[in-house]
Image (cartoon, grey):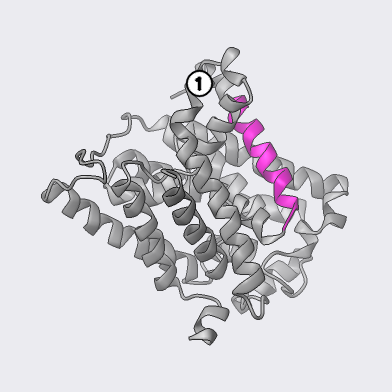
Amino acid sequence: MLEFIQNPWPWWFSGIIISAVMFFLLFFGKSFGFSSNLRTICSLSGAGKKVKLFDFDWKTQAWNLVFLVGAAIGGYIAHQFLTADEVPVIAAATTEELKQLGFGEAKSIQPEELFSLESLFTLKGFLVMAIGGLLVGFGSRYAGGCTSGHAISGISDLQVPSIIAVVGFFIGGLIMTHLIFPLIF
Amino acid sequence: MKFIKFLIVGIVFGIVMAKSEALSWYRIQEMFRFQSFHMYGIIGTAVTLGIIGVALIKRFKLRDIDGNPILFTPKDKSVKRYLFGGTIFGLGWALSGACPGPMVVNIGYGFVTFLVVLAFAVIGTYLYGVFQKKLPH
């Protein structure tokens, strides 16, 4: 049991829990959509005075901000108390291709080449993080949802817009990985 | 106290994203290189159970905790906004290795760099709001 908890959890277990998260939120009268929080934070910061998209009562979304805080606490708990060895077992082919781009063997779940503070304080390291975040924030609101709202909630309801959005997620992801990565790394 | 249930569900979400390594940049790279089943297994399992569960909720007209019917609002019909918005999102997802949920889980996990990613995701959302009227939808 302890071993199961401390080792990485299998995909099927994760999938079951994620669908359970969605059903619990539906049962609580809400829906699973994480990127709505980004819009709520804009509203909370007073952006509604200038931009119509953010002119709504953020308190109606307070529950989702509480969910966000919970997600951060969950990350903390998982790292501090539930993880024995955090070196991920990455597919050999991926490790090899990333090596060509200058990424060494994985030492933790995130590559230090991108996510260490040393990297963040370089111009390139900072730009990668900033542009990555910018695109995710802009794109999720443009598409009306992110992985949770479209790929999980929307497709569970067999909504065509969500299927189109997920096709878009993959077009973007494949362009970045296969065409842009070789140019920037 | 009415918020505690959302906190608990959020904690469960955060733990499972971390423990199944779905917050890892490497795992997203495996996915976009079609070299591992892991992420497809996670999303595929969640969606399969989701489709079955949503169909059951509709079939039996289930109600939520307050006794209101659980309703699903169809999203606006369009192709452009989902395709263009989705593609922009995908570019950022592959670059930063995280969609909005995992960004926050990563911060809790201890990767403070994601504070920058999240801050710029908020700025990106704001910029969409500013340019919304000028974009094809």
Image: B6 above or below B11: above
* Residue shown at the point (69%, 64%) measured from the top left: A110
Rendered view: A53 above or below B50: above
What percent of the width, then of the height, locates residue B27? 58, 66
- Judging depth in this view, the residue of B50 and A59 nearest the camera is A59
Residue most toward the left? B60
Assess disc 1: are there few (<14), some (14-19) or many (≥20) residues with their C-alpha within 10 Å of its C-alpha.
Answer: many
The image shows residue B67 at horizontal and vertical percentages of 20, 41
Q: Helix, strand or loop at disc 1? A: helix
Q: Nearer the viewer, residue A64 or B42?
A: A64
Q: Position of residue A87 (x, y in %)?
A: 68, 77
- Tell me the subunit letter for badge 1: A
Q: Is residue A174 visible?
A: no
Left or right of residue A173, residue A61 in this image: left
Relative to residue A160, is residue B137 depicted above or below? above
Asked if residue A87 can be seen in this view, the reply is yes
Q: The C terminus of chain B lies in which quarter of the figure?
A: top left
For residue A60, side relative to residue A83 (left or right):
left
Residue annotated with mark 1: A53
SS assignment for the magenta stretch, majority: helix
Where in the figure is residue B8, as x and y percent of width and height?
A: 46, 56
Is B119 a magenta residue?
Answer: yes
Q: Residue at x 87, y 56 (%)?
A: A118
Q: Nearer the viewer, residue A102 or A22?
A: A22
Identify the residue at horizontal 49%, vertical 36% (top origin).
A62
Residue occupying image coordinates x 30% and y 51%: A156
Q: Which residues are magenta?
A: B111-128
Magenta span includes A78: no
Amino acid residing under circle 1 = Leu
